[in-house]
Every structure is written in C-alpha cells, then in structure tokens.
Image: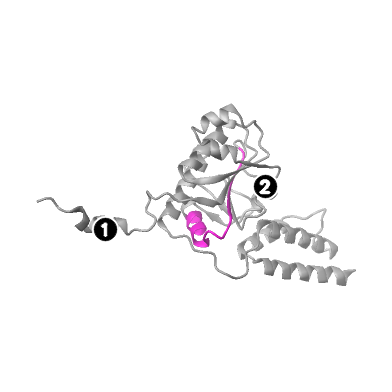
Amino acid sequence: MARSLTNDPKLHQKENMPNSSNELISIDHIDIVMVGTTHPGNIGAAARAMQNMCFKNLVLVDPQCPIGEIAYARSSGAHDILDRRKTVRSLKEAIADCHLVAGLTARQRSLPWPEMDPQQISQEISSKGSGMRVALVFGREHSGLTNDELTLCNYMVSIPTNPDFSSLNVASAIQVMCYEVYQTLSRHQLKVPEAGEPPATSQDIEGYMSHLQQVLETTEFLDPDNPGLLMQRLWRLYQRVELSKTEVNILRGILSSVQKYKS
C-alpha cells in the first residue's frame, strides 16, 4: 500500500522549517557598492549575481566606464537592477545612510582592521536585523580599495582563496558574498527593529570625526603637518564602538564645549 504523503513526518518537518533555502526572500536593506569600476561587463555580471540572490540595490561610485550595451548583455536579463542603479561621486556619499559597512579586500594593510570572512560578516549582518542598513563595498579591479576608503568601513572582509593566486574578479567576489549572505538570511528570521535609540549612520560618524580632527588641531594635540596614523587609529576605535545617534550628539557637544573654552 502506498504511503500517504500527508502522514510523512519528514514532509511535515520540511514544511515547518522557517525560511528554507528555496523560499524567496527580499534583501532590500543591503547595498552592493562598486568603487571605480573600469569594465562595464563586471557591472553587468554583478547585477546578474545580485538578481540570483535576491539583492536589489546597486550603487556605483565614480564608475570609469559607460553603463550601456555591454553591461546589459552581461547582466543576462537583470535589467531592473541596472535601471535602478544609483551613481555617486564618492564612497562617503554612497554609504552616508548605512549603519554597517564592510569593505572587501585581498590585501593586508599596515594598520590592522577588524577582519571577517564571508560567513562571519553574513552572521553579523543577520544578527543586526532588517533595521540596520548595510553596505558591502567592492574596490577597483586593479587596486581594490584605498586605505582612506577602508577607514570608512567597520570591517575588512577577505574571501579565502589560493594564497598563490588570491585576486578575484570583482563580479566573482560579489557572487560569493551575495551567496553567503543570502544563505544566512534564508536560514534565519531577521530581527524586527526594536524601539529605542537609532544607531549612528556612516554620515554621523564621518561628521563627528571631522569635528574631532578640528578640535585636536586647535588644541595642538594633532599636528596637521605630521598627523601619522592618529586619525586612522581613532576611526578604527569609533568604528568598533557602534555608537547611537544620541551618543554621537553627546560627543559632538563635548567637542563644541572644548572649542568654546579654547576661544
């Protein structure tokens, strides 16, 4: 006698699993940011990778190529993503409203930065919930991200590769990251944003750091002609703290009081 599918415990177990890998999810709180891209085919291939994994938002920072026939052909039908793309002049502008920024890089830096692999950053993104706007930042094909650009990121992310051939095509790197994040989010229920103090955005932190540098120069703690790595180290410190908007306002109020006293 044939077994009834409705009485199959394995079938019921599969039906009751939340966010199975086959369930379509919408990832609209994460931006894929491409900096200084020089080949339109890479932009098209990135759009295809995003569409494969339910990502929607593509941001181009100072692209060095036209977004035309080649990009659309390489996108293999992911035209909506290219049509909706956002183009800006600087990385600061691209991530202004983001709360968590991860920069992809294969190069070791002179100043150590909080580092994760794709699985770890995917878990971090999942734990923050849908209320946190995220940017995954990918650098130029030939040189990646500059140190100044990496300073704007909370984390440095490296994709494990053959150490003798570690350079990944930028579109391939985007495919890997989109896959890892999609798999993690599809297995976990995203947290609903809790009521309370909103987190500081990248623009909030950048404004505070500019204010801090002004005060440090005014008090002669920082020599503008020989700054060394002081500001980069302070950036790294504040990126780890995960400040709220209220905390940034308090810190800027303290800086303003120092400026008032100094004057």
Where is residue 39 shown, x and y percent of the image?
60, 31
**Is residue 126 inside the magenta stretch?**
yes
Q: Which corner quadrant of the image does residue 231 belong to?
A: bottom right
Q: Look at mark 1 in the image and give the residue it sits on.
A: 12
Where is residue 226 shown, x and y percent of the image?
80, 54
Where is residue 104 shown, x and y percent of the image?
56, 47
Q: Which mark is residue 124?
A: none
Circle 1: is it few (<14), some (14-19), or many (20+) Cα within 10 Å? few
Residue 168 visible in the current orientation: no
The amino acid at mark 2 is: Leu
The amino acid at mark 1 is: His
Q: Which corner quadrant of the image does residue 206 belong to?
A: bottom right
Q: Which corner quadrant of the image does residue 15 belong to?
A: bottom left
Closest to the observer: 23 or 185? Answer: 23
Magenta-tinted stretch:
120-140
Residue depicted at x 17% and y 54%? 4
**Residue at the outermost right position:** 263
Q: Which mark is residue 91?
A: 2
